[in-house]
Amino acid sequence: QKEVEQDPGPLSVPEGAIVSLNCTYSNSAFQYFMWYRQYSRKGPELLMYTYSSGNKEDGRFTAQVDKSSKYISLFIRDSQPSDSATYLCAMRDTGGFKTIFGAGTRLFVKA
Amino acid sequence: GAGVSQSPSNKVTEKGKDVELRCDPISGHTALYWYRQSLGQGLEFLIYFQGNSAPDKSGLPSDRFSAERTGGSVSTLTIQRTQQEDSAVYLCASSLDAYTEAFFGQGTRLTVV
């Protein structure tokens, strides 16, 4: 079993839809949780960075962490065609530098 | 530079040849990471450099892989006797330290034929 599980998709939604992306993990020591966006043939860029459980909002993006269920989510409101990309969840434990990534979910937002 | 720079952006090599991939991190960043991304897979950690400390090589898949970081700045990932399964995108990232945001380069797409 992988430490981080993420459905690779693809996920296709119409413009304006609310998108929900999710990851589950097995290591209870993970404390830092991240979401990266990766456009085709580009490096990943950090979207959201959260510590421990709770919610964090940034514009159209909301990250949720439920440590009791070992489950994290990224919500995208009012999705746009420019949001079409691969979204990678990532996480690491306190004091650790090694970040474990999910496989990434490919998202297509249709105009 | 303004961001993490990797070269070459694409590399096609014959099986059995050695290749060198280069990473120029953001100036002042003490932490540097190499990852490998295969088609449909997440990022696989390869190696981590932090300042002048000994690197963490625990992710290197075989002894054909090695990396160095000269003067705490530029890093080179070397793959000897390349195999077809080495074909992937190799990504470099740097961060101010081990606990802050990592910025990625655009990657080197390696194809072994």
Image (cartoon, rainbow, N blue to C red):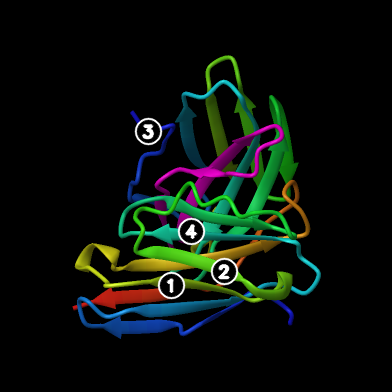
Asked if residue A11 lies left or right of residue B45, the reply is left
Q: Nearer the viewer, residue B18 or A5?
A: B18
Quarter holding residue A51: top right
Residue placed under numbered mark 2 in the picture: B68
2 and 1 marks in contact (CB < 8 Å): yes
Residue at screen point 40% across, 38% down:
A6
| Residue extending farthest right | B28
Q: Nearer the viewer, mark 3 or mark 1?
A: 1
Q: CA distance from mark 3 to mark 2?
A: 29 Å
User: What chain does mark 2 sit on?
Assistant: B
Tell me which segment is drawn in magenta: A84-111
- Say if labels 3 and 2 share a chain: no
Residue placed under numbered mark 1 in the picture: B78
What's under tag 3, amino acid-wise? Lys
- Residue B96 seen in render: yes
Residue at screen point 62% across, 43% down:
A34
